[in-house]
Amino acid sequence: MGTSRIYLYKPSPVFLVMMFVPMKVPLLDLRRQNLPLEAELVDAFRRVLTSGQFIQGPEVEQFESAAAAVAGARFGIGMSSGTDAILVALMALGIGPGGEVICPSFTFFATAGSIARVGARPVFADSCPECFNLDPAGIEPLITSRTKAIIPCTCSARRRTWTRSSRLPGATGWR
Ligand SMILES: Cc1ncc(COP(=O)(O)O)c(C=O)c1O
């Protein structure tokens, strides 16, 4: 027979309010980041509207070189969304049915969604409890002969804690 214990817990008034007052918590509020940039954004929208060039053109070219400079890459490619960017990268690598892609368990759903969309299988790796990014220690045991890629998303722009490692089994041939 087990013993029973009674724990006395005195909840704070704030906790009680949170427990019993219904609150609407939005998934995210884009107005908080967009409204401070309103004038700059409206200017850019107006430039595109008056040029009539909604696809490619100088605005996109400028964005692509600015993005490449920030990423320290030779090229940048403007995409319609983050989801499409992941999808195109997976397609460009020829990843599809039968393939596995390791990704963090704690990330936006577009990561696993895009992997599934090309017909591959998302394999979830644990996240680091301090930085919330993909924990490098959790990757190695998940690598199989079917592993085609690892997507190490950064969480809320937190600094990534690992780089491509030649110590990963079968690392030759990784792109
Ligand atoms: C890690 C990550 N990947 C992909 C996306 C998808 O971006 P989008 O909403 O532009 O498709 C997001 C969006 O928040 C994200 O946080």
Image: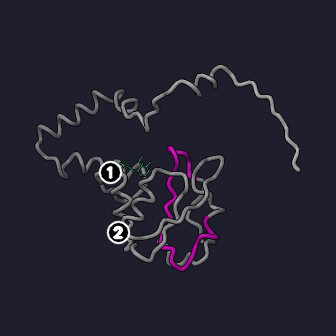
Q: Does the magenta stretch include residue 16?
A: no
- The residue carrying mark 1 is 81
Q: Residue 168 carries which label?
A: none
Q: Position of residue 33 (x, y in %)?
A: 39, 32
Label 1 near label 2: C-beta < 8 Å? Answer: no
Q: Mark 2 points at which residue?
A: 91
Which residue is drawn at the image coordinates 64% and 63% (left, top)? Answer: 138
In the image, residue 97 sits, relative to residue 152, either above or below, namely: below
Q: Which of 41 and 83 is in front in this view?
A: 83
Q: Please identify the quarter of the rendering in which residue 59 is found.
A: top left
- The x and y percentages for residue 2 are 87, 48
- Where residue 74 sits: x, y (%)? 37, 59
Circle 1: is it few (<14), some (14-19), or many (20+) Cα within 10 Å? few
What amino acid is labelled 1 in the image? Ser
- Write down the region rendered in magenta: 139-160
Left or right relative to 9: residue 85: left
